[in-house]
Image: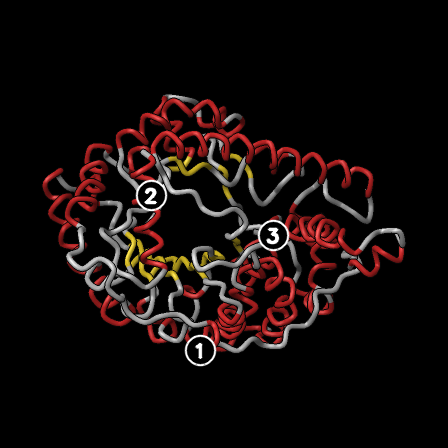
């Protein structure tokens, strides 16, 4: 297993180092919902105690070959959201955590948001989306709620991370360096999802586009800050799930959505920080925009023409996903194997490719385990390169990108180290990192409540 772990790590890192790997890396994992159903465990109970599925997760790791842990865990947990009285992430009767279309920011509050997005989120958005977070009217209850929610989140995270660590050791999955990964939304997407809502933003784009543009630009310092991980390496990244563009007219996309996000990925590139983006839905009409992204941006596609995507983007970017999940339930085992080989023949040549499905499975009936095993083993055995170590496409150089001038993040709810020292003058300078880590953790937590 140690040898397999080294092989897997070398294959994945070769892709990120612009080298052809020995074989195509495989990125296939199953979430908590699927593993619980596979185990015959009530989904609602597994959300409260993910350790209930460890035996089933172990069995699936043994059956399915992947270069990442087959058990992928779960992000949205009820103990975390229910502690705050969440209205924007609630559990359904079947145990799924769902996002109703909530409006946290009213149309008439754009000016308040533009003046200071973080202050506006705390004072206006959170009380609407979380009934137990009203900092102005009930600060004591809000303080207890934040503490309880953060403890619930950390407790669930500890269980999940511990389980993945045990499976990683047992099955030889590569270990990512801690602190090298981040996650954030595109500026306009965070303004849309739980602030103005999808329906609200669709109206605003037509009614008040100038306010939308101002709000997105005002949000940039917060969005930029939250996305930067503690450590920047060639193997780390910041993840962007891209939500709104495929539901927009191109003229609105090009003026309202694209500029601030394009600025953000370029700012990160100038720091040596790679972006990993999930192009949700069908981005085929935006391929020319994507071509302008920094070299070695890691792009995950849900839909699209694989041949055209490989032809236009395969020399510059690291591509992944696109293989239809539906193949697992609509094809025979042999058909699955044949379609996998066809897909590898399109996407693998020249390197810069990691195998994955177009979307995550939601319920167990979305997959056929035997077919999934066959697909993964076919990628492993068929996706072997004859020229490992050769250069793969264009190389990334952070010097090719210029960092924009970003305004400092400011809020009356955010304390800089200078302000901290004025209140605590005996604090040594060496304590700065510890103090600011704690301060920044609160900023990231508040931001996460808008996702």
State the residue position of label 3. Answer: 450
Q: Nearer the viewer, mark 2 or mark 3?
A: 2
State the residue position of label 2. Answer: 6
When asked about the image quadrant of residue 190, the answer is bottom right
Residue lying at 47% horizontally and 26% vertically, measured from the top left = 46
Q: Say whether marks 1 and 3 touch (CB < 8 Å).
A: no
User: How far across and down, in percent of the image, does residue 311 sit?
Assistant: 23, 70
What whole-number distance in Å separates the C-alpha atoms at marks 2 and 3? 38 Å
350 w.r.t. 327: above or below: below
Q: Quadrant of the N terminus?
A: top left
Q: Is residue 404 left or right of residue 352?
A: right
Q: Nearer the viewer, mark 1 or mark 3?
A: 3
Q: Is residue 166 left or right of residue 301?
A: right
What whole-number distance in Å separates the C-alpha atoms at marks 1 and 3? 26 Å
* Label 2, residues with CA under 10 Å away: few <14, some 14-19, many ≥20: some
* Label 3, residues with CA under 10 Å away: few <14, some 14-19, many ≥20: some
User: How far across and down, in percent of the image, does residue 275 sit?
Assistant: 45, 62
Residue lying at 32% horizontally and 71% vertically, measured from the top left = 394
User: How far across and down, in percent of the image, does residue 74 sit?
Assistant: 47, 38
Q: Nearer the viewer, mark 1 or mark 2?
A: 2
């Amino acid at each position: 297993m140690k040898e397999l772990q080294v092989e897997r790590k070398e294959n994945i890192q070769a892709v990120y180092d612009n080298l052809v790997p020995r074989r195509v890396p495989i990125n296939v994992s199953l979430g908590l919902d699927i593993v619980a159903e596979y185990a015959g465990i009530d989904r609602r109970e597994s959300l409260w105690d993910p350790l209930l599925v460890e035996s089933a997760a172990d069995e699936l790791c043994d059956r399915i070959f992947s270069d990442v842990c087959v058990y992928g865990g779960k992000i949205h947990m009820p103990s975390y959201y229910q502690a705050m009285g969440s209205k924007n992430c609630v559990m359904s009767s079947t145990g799924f955590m769902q996002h109703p279309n909530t409006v946290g920011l009213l149309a008439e509050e754009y000016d308040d948001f533009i003046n200071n997005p973080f202050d506006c989120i705390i004072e206006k958005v959170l009380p609407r989306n979380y009934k137990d977070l009203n900092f102005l009217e009930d600060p004591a209850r809000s303080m207890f709620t934040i503490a309880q929610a953060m403890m619930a989140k950390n407790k669930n995270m500890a269980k999940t991370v511990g389980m993945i660590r045990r499976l990683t050791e047992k099955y030889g999955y590569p270990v990512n360096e801690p602190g090298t990964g981040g996650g954030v939304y595109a500026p306009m997407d965070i303004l849309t999802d739980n602030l103005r809502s999808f329906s609200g933003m669709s109206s605003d784009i037509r009614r008040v586009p100038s306010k939308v543009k101002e709000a997105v630009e005002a949000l940039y310092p917060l969005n930029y800050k939250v996305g930067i991980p503690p450590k920047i390496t060639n193997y780390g990244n910041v993840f962007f799930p891209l939500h709104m563009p495929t539901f927009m007219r191109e003229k609105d996309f090009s003026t309202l959505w694209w500029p601030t996000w394009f600025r953000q990925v370029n700012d990160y590139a100038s720091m040596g920080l790679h972006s990993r983006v999930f192009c949700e839905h069908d981005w085929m009409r935006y391929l020319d925009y994507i071509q302008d992204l920094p070299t070695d941006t890691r792009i995950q596609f849900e839909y699209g023409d694989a041949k055209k995507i490989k032809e236009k983007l395969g020399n510059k970017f690291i591509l992944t996903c696109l293989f239809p999940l539906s193949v697992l339930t609509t094809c025979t085992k042999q058909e699955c194997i044949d379609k996998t080989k066809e897909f590898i023949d399109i996407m693998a040549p020249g390197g810069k490719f990691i195998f994955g499905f177009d979307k995550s499975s939601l319920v167990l009936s979305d997959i056929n385990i035997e077919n999934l095993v066959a697909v993964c083993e076919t990628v492993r055995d068929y996706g072997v390169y004859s020229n490992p170590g050769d250069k793969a496409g264009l190389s990334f150089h952070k010097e090719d990108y210029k960092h924009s001038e970003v305004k400092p993040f400011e809020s009356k709810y955010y304390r800089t180290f200078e302000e901290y020292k004025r209140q605590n003058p005996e604090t040594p300078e060496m304590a700065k990192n510890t103090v600011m880590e704690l301060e920044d953790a609160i900023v990231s937590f508040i931001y996460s409540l808008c996702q």
